Amino acid sequence: MQEISVYKNLSKLSIRKSKDDFLLTELTQLLEASGVEITSLHLERQDEEWIDILLTVNAEDLKHLLPTLRRFDYEVMSKHKEDDLEDKLQEHASYLDKYLSM
């Protein structure tokens, strides 16, 4: 009998959104539309302005999920290697901009 581990490549993702704009249904619809397997979703903290959410998802899904969340005004609080690629692209774009403006 072969044992299969369903949850072997998980990543924790901490996100934040303003309390006035946060809808749990919107978040779950975004996750499902992105094809993300939600292992856990925990409302960590809320105050008068913000709601902090801790998600556990498949790590392979982060490449497409992070930009999608940012497009819908979620602030990604945790740092991931997929963010490094975006930072490098921004750095290259600003260098190209500087070069073209000379």
Image (cartoon, rainbow, N blue to C red):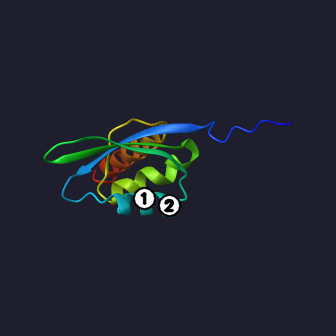
Q: Secondary structure at mark 1?
A: helix
Q: Which residue is mark 2?
A: 32
Left or right placement of residue 89 versus residue 102 in this view? right
Q: Position of residue 52 (x, y in %)?
A: 29, 43
Q: Position of residue 1 (x, y in %)?
A: 86, 36
CA distance separating discs 1 and 2: 6 Å
Left or right placement of residue 99 versus residue 58 in this view? left
Q: In the rendered view, would you say 54 is above or below 64?
A: above
Q: Quadrant of residue 84?
A: top left
- 10 Å neighbourhood of mark 1: few (<14), some, or many (≥20)? some
- 10 Å neighbourhood of mark 2: few (<14), some, or many (≥20)? few
Q: Position of residue 23 (x, y in %)?
A: 30, 60
* Number of dots carrying numbers: 2
Q: Are marks 1 and 2 in contact (CB under 8 Å)?
A: yes
At a point 58% along the width and 45% down the height, the residue shown is 60
Camera-nearest residue between 50 and 45? 45
Q: Quadrant of residue 5?
A: top right
Q: Position of residue 71 (x, y in %)?
A: 34, 59
Camera-nearest residue between 98 and 70? 70
Q: Which residue is mark 1?
A: 28
Q: Amino acid at mark 1?
A: Thr
At a point 46% along the width and 53% down the height, the residue shown is 65
Q: Amino acid at mark 2?
A: Glu
Left or right placement of residue 61 versus residue 102 in this view? right
